[in-house]
Image (tube, grey):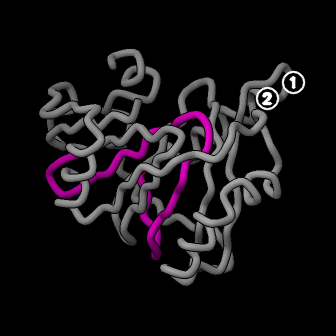
């Protein structure tokens, strides 16, 4: 279940709003200039399905987004629990990278196919967390301060779209704000 949680940026312990109502989430994000939509997810894919398989299952949605936005690069980002002894290190390294507040020169567009992750948007004097799950499309506008948390046991597949041929390029703010708000595991447990 998708969840929106909102705080004042200077009061990370005091939730101002929490809702799982998709219409309320879409309205709250639209008011802030953020695109959020829920789309049907293609037939269940096996966990860890390859990029080509994910693309084939979601070809119409991808083609529509590329036509709308002129995206140059489309890829699949995914992490799923594994018994591989190196998995925990890989997952922790990936999580740490995205947990720092950053911006992008272009919109960050994600369509979640499986699992979940949380985008935290630092919008002036507030922080808005959007727990995205399968079927959620989120487009974070260029230059929006944000961070992403996939939890201590990441389990998600998301289609990513980029204008820049280099793909994901972040500019880190060096603001420690991300460490002051409830993380993925805390927010998921609280819902």
Q: Is residue 126 magenta?
A: yes
- Up the image or down, 24 lies above or below 11; here it is below
- Up the image or down, 4 lies above or below 182; here it is below
Q: Is residue 136 magenta?
A: no
- Up the image or down, 46 lies above or below 120; here it is above
Secondary structure type for disc 1:
loop
Q: Residue furthest top?
A: 189
Where are the magenta residues, as a range?
Answer: 101-127
Left or right: residue 1 versus residue 58 is left
Q: Residue at the spot x=87%, y=24% of the render?
A: 84
Q: Quadrant of the N terminus?
A: top left
Q: Which mark is residue 87?
A: 2
Q: Quadrant of the C terminus?
A: top left
Overall secondary structure of the magenta section:
strand
Q: Residue at the spot x=57%, y=39% of the render?
A: 96
Res. 23 image quadrant: top left
The percent coordinates of residue 39 (x first, y second) are: 47, 51
Res. 151 image quadrant: top right
């Amino acid at each position: 279940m998708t969840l929106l949680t909102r705080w004042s940026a200077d009061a990370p312990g005091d939730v101002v709003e929490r809702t799982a109502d998709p219409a309320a989430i879409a309205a709250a994000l639209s008011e802030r200039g953020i695109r959020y939509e829920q789309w049907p997810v293609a037939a269940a894919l096996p966990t860890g399905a390859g990029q080509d398989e994910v693309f084939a299952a979601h070809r119409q949605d991808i083609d529509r987004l590329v036509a709308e936005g002129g995206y140059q690069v489309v890829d699949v980002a995914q992490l799923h629990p594994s018994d591989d002894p190196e998995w925990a290190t890989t997952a922790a390294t990936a999580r740490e990278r995205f947990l720092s507040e950053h911006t992008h020169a272009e919109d960050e567009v994600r369509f979640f196919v499986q699992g979940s992750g949380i985008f935290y948007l630092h919008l002036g004097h507030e922080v808005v967390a959007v727990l995205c799950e399968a079927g959620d499309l989120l487009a974070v506008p260029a230059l929006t301060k944000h961070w992403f948390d996939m939890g201590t046991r990441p389990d998600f597949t998301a289609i990513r779209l980029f204008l820049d041929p280099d793909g994901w390029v972040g500019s880190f703010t060096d603001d420690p704000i991300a460490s002051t708000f409830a993380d993925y595991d805390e927010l998921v447990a609280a819902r």
